[in-house]
Amino acid sequence: MSTLPDDVKIFVVQQLACFDTPSEVAKAVKEEFQLEVSRQAVEAYDPTKRAGSSLSEEYRQIFFTTRETFLTDTAAIGVSHRAVRLRTIQRLTERAERSGNLVLVASLLEQAAKEAGNAFTNKREVGGIGGTPLAVEHTVAIPDLSTMTQEERDGLRALLTRTEGSLP
């Protein structure tokens, strides 16, 4: 692989940094540059593997810079956005409907509903009817008895005795 042009080497290093497998990268090189490259030759450009232990500093720097950018910049990955996923589901649904695959259509519609309802996020909104905030019925602050006077403790005891039957 040392006879490859620099732009191909950089391409290989960047693909590996984005966690593509050596087989995937070899296939991408063939499609992109019309060059045959073995999986083993590609693996020599991954500094995290034993085969890439002798990779030059220049390509190591490219690898680790690309990997850091890849891990921190999900905005560049289309499917990380809900709108992109919904558009794709829409296209797939239309195609499945045209081909008469009603089971797939139903499955895709369920997927779209989950996607639109934030089923695939950690964010959940809890509210009342029409999105109004839920009413908090009881808030109980536990008093620090050690700082209360005897008179305050007696008053608290009386209050708890009166409300004993009405607490949930």
Image (cartoon, rainbow, N blue to C red):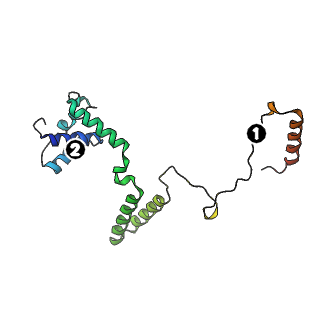
Kind of residue at disc 2: Val
- Which of the two marks, 2 or 1, is nearer to us in this view? 1
Residue 45 is drawn in which quadrant? top left
On screen, residue 143 above or below 136: above
Q: Nearer the viewer, residue 6 or 46?
A: 6
Q: Nearer the viewer, residue 37 or 58?
A: 58
From the viewer's perspective, is 162 left or right of 19?
right
Which residue position is annotated with label 2?
A: 25
Which residue position is annotated with label 1?
A: 142
Q: Residue at x 47, y 60 (%)?
A: 116
Kind of residue at disc 1: Ile
Where is residue 61 shown, x and y percent of the image? 26, 33
Query: Quarter holding the N terminus?
Result: top left
Near mark 1 (Cα within 10 A), the count class, few <14, some 14-19 or many ≥20, is few
Where is residue 64 shown, x and y percent of the image? 29, 35
Q: Residue at x 34, y 54 (%)?
A: 78
Q: Residue at x 37, y 50 (%)?
A: 75
Q: Callout 2: helix, strand or loop?
A: helix
| Marks 2 & 1, CB-CB < 8 Å contact | no
From the viewer's perspective, is 126 left or right of 109?
right
Q: CA distance from mark 2 to mark 1?
A: 62 Å
Where is residue 98 shown, x and y percent of the image? 33, 72
